Structure formats: C-alpha cells, structure tokens
Image: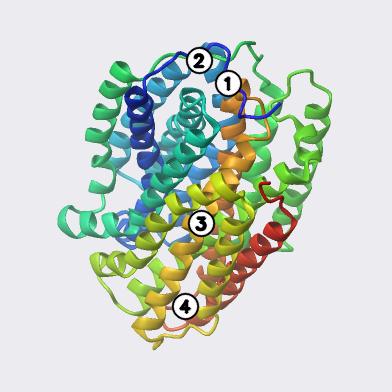
Amino acid sequence: MTATTTHPAAPALSARRRWTVLAVCCLSMFLVGLDTTIVNVGLPAIGRGLGVGTRGLEWTVDAYTIVLAGLLISSGALADRFGRRRVFQSGLMVFGVASLVCATAPSVGALVAARAVQGIGASMLSPVALAIVVNAMPDPRERAQAIGIWASVFGLSMAVGPVTGGALVAALGWRALFWINAPVIVAALVLSAVFVPESRGPRAQRLDVPGQVLLTVVIGVWVGVLIEGPRIGWTAPAALAAYAFASMATVGFIWAESRRRQPLMDLRLFRSPVFSSAVLGAVAVFVALNVTLLLNTLYLQQTRGLTPPAAGAATLPMAVGATVCAPWSGRLVGRLGPRLPLTLAGGFTMAGGLCLVGLDRHTSLPQLLLAYLLTGIGFGFANAPITNTAVSGLPAARAGVAGAITSTARQVGSALGIAVAGGLVANSTPAGLAHASRPGWILVAACGLLLVLMARASRSKT
C-alpha cells in the first residue's frame, strides 16, 4: 500500500479549496524554513549584541534544529491521532510565543532556550502541513504537483532566509529576525481556521515515550559532541564519555523500537532501499545546504568585510536556483520518477562544492555567485523526489509519520551541517577562515556525489 491510496475519511474538496489548503500549508512551511536559515546571516550581529563567540552562535541555530528533529515524528503521530488542524494551529501558537521571547532575549542562554521552544512549535507544523496536503489531494498526479510546490516553497524559504535576514538586520537590528514571524503567524492561524478541514488517521497510535526520549538524546548528544569537540578535545575524557553515551542511546533506541507494536519510528521501513535512500538523501541535501550557508555567512562578513545586507544579497543566486528548479523537479517526478531530478540535484550540488574547494580571501565574486547558483539549483531539484519517495513509502493514513521521518532527516542534516561547519572554523581568524573552510566544501561536493549514486540506484517511473 502506498501514499497514492486515498485517505478513507478525506473530505471531498473542490479544486479551489484543495489549492487554498495547499497555500495555507505552504505559508506555515515558509515560516519554518525561513527560521531555519534567516538567523544565519544575523549571527555576527547576534554575537556582538550578546557577547558570544562562534560556538554559542552554533547553539543558537542548532537548539532549534535538534529539538525540531527530535519531536517531528511524535508530532506527526499526535496529529494523526488528535487532529491535524488542531495540532497545526497549536504549533503556530507555540512558535509565535517563542519567537516573541527570542526577540526580547536578554542573553544568549535565554535566546538558545527560546529557540528550543521554537523548535517544539515548528515540529507541529512541518509534518502536519505535508499530511494535510497529501490528504487533500487524492489524485496522484495532482498530489505530485502539490508536493513539488510545497518543496518549492520550503526550498525558497530556506534559500531566501539569508537575503531577508540581511535586510532586517541592517534596517532594524538582529531582533527583527524574530519579530517578523508575528504577522505570518496571525495570518496562518486565521486562514487555517477558515479553509483547512480537520482530518485524522483511521487508527490512533499510542505515543512512544521511551522512543521519543531516546531519539532526542541520540540526536542531541551526537550533534553536541560535534559542536563542543573542538573546545574540549576530540579524545578528552568528556568527549569519550559522550561517544559512549550516544552509542548506548543509539543501540537502546534501535532495541526499543524493534520491540514495540507501535514504535515511534518503524525500523522495518528501512529495509526498503528506496525509503532508506530517500532518508539518507534528505540528510545529505541539508548537510550540504547548511554547511554552505554558515561558511558563507562567516566568510563574507568576517573575511571579506561585507555588510549583512550585502552578504545576504550575495546568496540571491541560491534562492533563484532553488525557486525556479523546485517546481520543475516536482513535474519531472510526476512524469518520469525520481532518477533524473536526483541526478541533476547531485550534479549541481557537487559542482557548487567543487567551485569553492580552493577558496581564499581573494576568490572572485563571479566564482562565488556561480557556486551559490549551482548549489541552489541542486537544492531545488532535490526536495521533490526525496519527499515524494518517502511519502510513497507509507500508507496515506500514516502521512503524518511519513512526512515526519523525512522532515526529521532534513533537520538532522541541518544540525549536522551547522555543527561540522562551525567546528571547522571555530578557532579561525578572519584571515585564515577561508582556508579552514575548505574541507567543508569537499563535504558539500561529497553530498552531491551521494545523490548521484542514489539516483543511479533509484527506480524510474514506467
């Protein structure tokens, strides 16, 4: 049974209503994606304003992504049980309140804590929005187009985050990065109440508390080690203890999930090479994107001396590439299957990384812009085939869980990308930052190569 099976309780919506539902869900996803990257370009300003270095800035970003990644699957299951619109609106309210706390945070500790609460709210939006879209679109071809648009909006939001953030920081200061969420939250709450129908899964799934705790620990500790490793030393007793603890938590999670009747994450799904490759691909795409965003933010502002608006504007080719190619990718998936768009995604991402493996403080602006454009094109082509493949791996009635697994993989990739990129340049001077970042560009190229290999192993639509 695949996600092309219509939800048995799905309401019969008119075409206009279906696309209105998609628009409302896309609005919320734009907010989640924007908040994942909009903070990047403001990190130097936040650091100056709150008196914190690179490592504290990493936690400002990763507190959000770690919590988001850890709670996504449970939020999807809760939405299937208690009502997707109800959970969706609850997430909007939590996200909005946390955004206001971020905007008024007096210290980096308060900011990191509020960002974690933002992650709780965002976890109720990402998988639930996709589940609402999937259940509102019973026709497989229309659904593929809708997922392409959804992926396009999500990709656009992440790609334009640095541009928007740069403008806000220059005009209003870094706190405006969080104030901007308020009008979007209000609009999404009103529109969802008017247009989005309530829906649930046909069978209630019990909340897997042990699995939820273990998954959050696994993600948090592994990412935390990557962030703090350069400071405490990779072979220090504290680091070795963290490795052991994270390894035990990982084994414990696998053991616990394999023995539950209704696990948080059904590990049997990973027996399917198609589903496993989609999850791995989602991690790789978001590692590449977040390595690119963080390294370029620091390079452009600290090494090249660009202002936040100029640094944000420099990444505009990335936004253009993602915006143009994501809906095109959705159409290709609907007509031909995932192989071609995945191949294009991998090839362009690899080319973008290779453009910057020799980065120095005098690298020409056209070369930088070309690298950003190539990376944006790769990102645009990647999301639709990965999302469509993952959703197709579960019944439509479990669409919330299907979207949650993919979204979890994305956020794990985001957290890992930030942690790795920050670790590479944490102790670098502005003059040495470009050279220190070169392994990061090799990693971006390797992620692109992985997508190409995945595409060769994927099934084309017949």
Can residue 90 be spotted in the picture? yes
* Tag 2 and tag 1, C-beta contact below 8 Å: yes
Task: Decide if residue 338 is on the left or right side of residue 164.
Answer: right
Q: Nearer the viewer, mark 4 or mark 1?
A: 1
Task: Decide if residue 115 is on the left or right side of residue 421.
Answer: left
Residue matched to label 1: 6
Q: Position of residue 177 (x, y in %)?
A: 28, 48
Viewer-proximal residue among 461 and 353: 461
- Amino acid type, callout 1: Thr
Residue matched to label 2: 10
Residue matched to label 4: 433
Say which label, 4 or 1, has the lower sequence index: 1
Viewer-proximal residue among 110 and 368: 368
Q: Nearer the viewer, mark 2 or mark 4?
A: 2
| Element type where label 3 sits in the image | helix
- Amino acid type, callout 3: Phe
Task: Give the Cα separation between the discs numbered 3 and 4.
Answer: 30 Å
Q: Is residue 70 above or below residue 415?
A: above
* Tag 3 and tag 2, C-beta contact below 8 Å: no
Say which label, 3 or 2, has the lower sequence index: 2
| Element type where label 4 sits in the image | helix
Q: Position of residue 297 (x, y in %)?
A: 38, 66
Q: Is residue 308 above or below residue 274?
A: below
Q: Nearer the viewer, mark 3 or mark 1?
A: 1
Residue matched to label 3: 381
